[in-house]
Amino acid sequence: MKYITTIYMWMVAFTFFLWISIFTIIASKFITPDKIYPYTSVLFRLFFKFLFIKVEVVNKEEVDTSKSYIFMPNHNSMFDVFLAGAFIPVYVNALEAESHFKWFFYGSVIKAYGQIPISRTNPRSAIRSFNIAKERLKMGRSTIVFPEGHRSKNGELQRFKKIPFRFAKDANVDLIPIGFSGVHAISPEANKWLKPGKIKVHFGKKITKEEIKELSVEELMNMTRERVYDLVDDFKVKVTD
């Protein structure tokens, strides 16, 4: 049964991705990415419905859609990007590995959507990418950063990188932690099997720009990691009788 389920889910995922990609590339010729976002957001939500994945969104009211933010979630799967596109209620620019921009077709899609390439090996290049993100924030465009840097292979929360928090210190906007629960069970990074299930997108209490100014980079990183950890149900110890 898992073979049939996986084949169906991959077919649906590929079909949705293809149509969303074609729409994004064509639309980008006429309107800016932030104007494309409301349409792709609806398509991404349909994507999860057709995969029989129920998504619960908690505390979305923490996000004031008139403001720009830095969002920082945990990172388990390719589905994290779709979750962000579907359920973060504002358009966000993502910092994405620069190698992805060279991939056939996919590179064109993320360019059209306004994503920002970032080097995983060159710190100076990475800082330039964060400076671009900072300029986008001044334009009113929010940014999403996966502070672990890579997808977790075992579903556990990995160590956070410091560079995103140096960026957050300079950006002068609020930071909102996000917890994605249930993603690893649906799409483990270590294999290609997929299965329906339930995902929770939990927006945490924002760390205000005033608080950020008072914290060191290390303190901000640790605070954010603690809040993300507390937002993810997968990390909570289940007590049984």
Image (tube, rainbow, N blue to C red):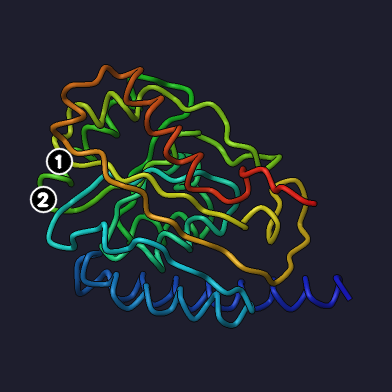
Splitting the image into 4 quarters, where does residue 210 fall?
A: top left
Give the farthest residue toward the right: 1
Tell me the CA gap for discs 1 and 2.
7 Å
Splitting the image into 4 quarters, where does residue 34 fall?
A: bottom left
Q: Residues within 10 Å of mark 2 (few under 14, many from 20)?
A: few
Left or right: residue 64 compared with residue 228:
left
Residue designated by label 1: 135
Left or right: residue 3 compared with residue 73:
right
Residue in front for this viewpoint, 52 or 21: 52
Residue 151 locus on image (x, y percent): 59, 41
| Residue 139 - label | 2
Q: Residue at x 58, y 51 (%)?
A: 233
Q: Residue at x 21, y 26 (%)?
A: 169
Residue 2 locus on image (x, y percent): 85, 71
Task: Please determine whether, in this image, residue 101 is positioned above or below residue 106.
Answer: above
Query: Which three-letter amino acid code belongs to the residue tagged 1?
Result: Glu
* Secondary element at image label 2: loop
Query: Which three-letter amino acid code belongs to the residue tagged 2?
Result: Met
Residue in front for this viewpoint, 230 or 103: 230
Task: Please determine whether, in this image, residue 182 is positioned above or below residue 36.
Answer: above
Give yes or no for contact between labels 1 and 2 (Cβ–Cβ under 8 Å): yes
